[in-house]
Image (tube, coloured by chain):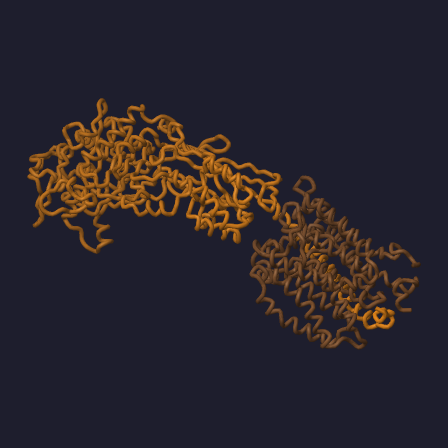
Amino acid sequence: MIQRIRRREQDPDIARRARVLLYVAVGAFFLLLSRLYWLQVVSYDTYQALSENNRLRMRTVRAPRGPIFDRKGRPIAETQGSFDLVCSPIDVADPAGEIRFLSEIVEFDADPVEILEKVREAMVSNPFTSITVARDLRFEQVSVIEFNREGLPGFSVMVEAKRSYPYGTAFAHALGYVGEASPEELDARSDGRLAMGDLVGKYGLERLMDNVLRGINGGRKVEVDAAGRDQRMVEEVPSTTGMPLYTTLDLDLQNAAKDALGSQAGAVIALVPKTGEVLAFYSAPAFDPNVFARGIRKADWQALNADPRKPMQNKGLQGTYAPGSTVKPFLALAALEERIIDKSASLHCPGSYRLGNRTFRCWKEKGHGSVDMYRALVQSCDVYFYTLGLRLGPEPVAAVEKGAGMGTLTGIDLPGERKGLVPDKEWKRRVSKERWYDYESLLLGIGQGAIHLTPLEMTVGYATLATGGEVMRPHVVAKVVLPDGSTTEKKPELVRKLAWKPENVEFIRKGLAGVVNDYGTGGRAKLPGIVVGGKTGTAQVAQVKGKMIKSEDLPYEIRDHAWFAGFAPVEDPRIAVVAMVEHGGHGGSAAAPIVKAVMQEFFRTQEAGPPAAEKR
Amino acid sequence: MSGPSKLARMDWPLLFIAILLCGIGLVNVYSGTRVHGGAASALFAKQFLWIALGLGVFFATYYLSDGFIEEATPGYAILILVLLVIVLAVGQIRGGAQRWISLGGFNLQPSEFAKIGVVLMLARYYSSKYQYGGIGLADTLPAIGMVLVPFLLVALQPDLGTAGVLLFILAGMSVIACVKGWLLGLFAFLGSAAIPALWYFMKDYQRQRVITFLDPERDPLGAGYHVIQSKIAVGSGGILGKGYLQGTQGALRFLPEKHTDFAFAVFSEEWGFLGSALLLLLFALLVRRLFHLAIRSQDRFASFACGGVAVYFLTHTVINLAMVCGLFPVVGIPLPFVSYGGSSMLTNMLALGMVANLSRSRFTFQGGGTRGQELSS
């Protein structure tokens, strides 16, 4: 011990070394002080802002979408509350674990792997915007999630507005559906009203009227802790519900059309000839728009698109079909207008027509014998109309048909309309650089060959026959109620007025009444007490050589399309209806009963009620 | 025995600073751990208990008789080594590391006490090897070996923060004990060269922390989260702070480990630059006082031990603060007296008690008649 006790003065180097360390310490503390000065004084504003962002979350309060009503004020699309599972990416601690746990409780909108990917992506790219991962939870599911709240910091159950369509498939193609806004839509709509995760109309009226139906999102500024739990609300901006939309559609007629078509594929359209108001617009097969509102799964979407009967296609305005005999009244009208033939002049139908070295058959093998124009319409004699087509040539036929709104866009207020084709020599020259052949004129007479029309065009054409030459623009929107309570109504819009001679139109109408009521091909559209006029059509899908084979005996894909187009009452038409059944066979048997069912429902429910009908 | 009583020879400035820091720490633990909008947490009460126990340790150590600490050094060192082995064998695994021995309700962290063991062993060894003109290579290597054993045991837990502190203590004490300058330079060079090897021994999360430190924005929600949130807390404190209990970063639980390693973030958010600077000043005073006592000690063992403790507090304070300010990777090193934690509190108090005890000896020649003088006469 003795040796170790020494005076400090003996070890000046120890003191010197210790002082060196003390200077190092002073330097280190000075460095820390400058760092604190930098962080707290110089960079204060930056960190202050970051700190604010940290604890404040903007919780979007999504605006409920405006309801859609039928013409009698019955809701056909509503917005309801739904318990949704919402993810707040910034608060997610263990994405894989939390999603694995949740996948055992709820059914995600997409595959859990996709959800995980989406969440992981959002954690980096968009951590403060919440994403909905599952919709429409049941009470038990909500309970389980709430019970396990601690282990699920990134997820919470929120009441979100959900689109619901009480009549399911009935209005699918007219109303369309809504879905989460895609990145492209978010980019395209720069009005600032569209936020990530918002529902937008993807199809049908929902899409066309999206700006009206979609409300303005509100927001809640809330203070949260690191686990994402709301601590207190700082500020709230209420949301504004979307505006209600009144349509011209009639629930009863729509349902009647759906029921009458049953499991068949096709389209049924009904409208008010004098105003263009669409009363029913049904396309089948349809999809359930409710499924989309819950976020359709990829597999379901793929199945819908792979279905050969194309449930995602609106056959009413996107499908084009050979019109078959339904064009005959237009040929008759053209012939009368052009004075090609006298309506009382008779032609002989031996069951076929020979042109050059080809033979064109009448649907009635034995032939109709001697037929005048009225009989030819009522019996749908092909030979008579072969003759008319040949004598008229394409131009006058096209003039009448196009004039009546066929082969052109009708301008209906539904998205995605396609136009059919009414051929003429000019068209032929343009597409094939070939001259027009006589057999083509002949085929025009029975609505075969190049001509193809959408059911909507057909409806407008027959509505024009019903009005005697007034082409009205078909429309589905009746009125929009603005936030201040005022309404904007859609007025009937006259596209053009045709100079058809009234007596010619009168004669055609009489012929159409005969089709239904005078032992014609359309007898199955007959209604008691009301004179229905209309025309059947059976459109060949494939040329079948040799002996005539009944349509029912053919494979489904090459069976004829069945048409029936008509209006009622003939003396003062208040409704025009077209039914087209894909591969349905004969128009008289497959399509006429559908038109009858819709008309029957129309007259049973005392016609169209307010709001738009009374404004005629 | 004459002369001033032990209590009269107490180094009051040292004790005063320590108690002040404990008070600040306690108040800060309250803010950092209280239930949001509610009452104090159990941790606050526990910290209070740790401070009381710590003061007990301080005085118990202070009242140890002269020379006892030096004589007990090998025993203490062996005890620590045993505990370090035990912790590796049966210790509780928390957060991927095995650092704690459970003693009833309390978890003891032997690696904390290992720092004192290293300080004492080195002080004892270097004071026996001291020679005018500096300690040479042959006498330095055993010192390195002496530290290497606990270093490896601690690094295996793994607790690289504490292991690193052991190296800093070795380096600092080697400086004070006058290891030759060229040797210090050589070891500094070899030490830097060994960093790649260190990388090899790191766990993935530790490597991640280093990578993240170099580029925090790289993983803002993962390993970079701590650093970013901590900087936000400090920076948003501004000059005057958000006010006590008003810190949103801390209260809203954005800060991880805000009562332990990140306690300073809570403090500086609430007290601002003025508060932080004041706290910094207190630590600077503590370290200065320790170096001062090292310089003034009358015996080499005391001098080196005080110097070691000074290096220990300096290292802890600077690394912790640098970490919280985003100047250093996140390593688990608490801020002395301010961070919540029993082992750390007891270690700190033990260290200060030791210094106070050893620095008593500087009164030896002034008062006369004490043990030192008796022995030398």
The answer to whether residue B213 shows anywhere in this view is yes
The quarter of the displayed image where residue A366 is located: top left
Looking at the rendered image, the quarter that the N terminus of chain A falls into is bottom right
The quarter of the displayed image where residue A367 is located: top left
Q: Please give the name of the residue rendered at 69% of the width and 51% of the height, measured from the top-left corner.
A: B341
* Residue nearer the viewer, A267 or A155: A155
How far from the left and from the top, in percent, is residue B162?
67, 61
Residue A144 in the image: above or below residue A29: above
- Residue A130 relative to residue A282: left or right: right
* Residue nearer the viewer, B351 or A593: B351
Q: Please give the name of the residue rendered at 52% of the width and 53% of the height, measured from the top-left corner.
A: A125
Numbered label tally: 0
- Residue B285 relative to residue B341: left or right: right
Q: Please give the name of the residue rendered at 75% of the width and 50% of the height, measured from the top-left corner.
A: B53
- Residue B217 relative to residue A485: left or right: right
The answer to whether residue A510 shows anywhere in this view is no
Q: Please give the name of the residue rendered at 71% of the width and 75% of the height, measured from the top-left corner.
A: B185
* Residue nearer the viewer, A398 or A498: A398
Residue B46 in the image: above or below residue A263: below
How far from the left and from the top, in percent, is residue A449?
19, 46
Residue A152 in the image: above or below residue A76: below
How far from the left and from the top, in percent, is residue A201?
42, 41
Q: Name the colour assigned to chain B in the rendering.
A: brown
Chain drawn orange, letter?
A
- Residue B221 relative to residue A419: left or right: right
Looking at the rendered image, the quarter that the C terminus of chain A falls into is top left
Residue A26 in the image: above or below residue B220: below
How far from the left and from the top, in percent, is residue A448?
18, 44
* Residue nearer the viewer, A401 or A590: A590
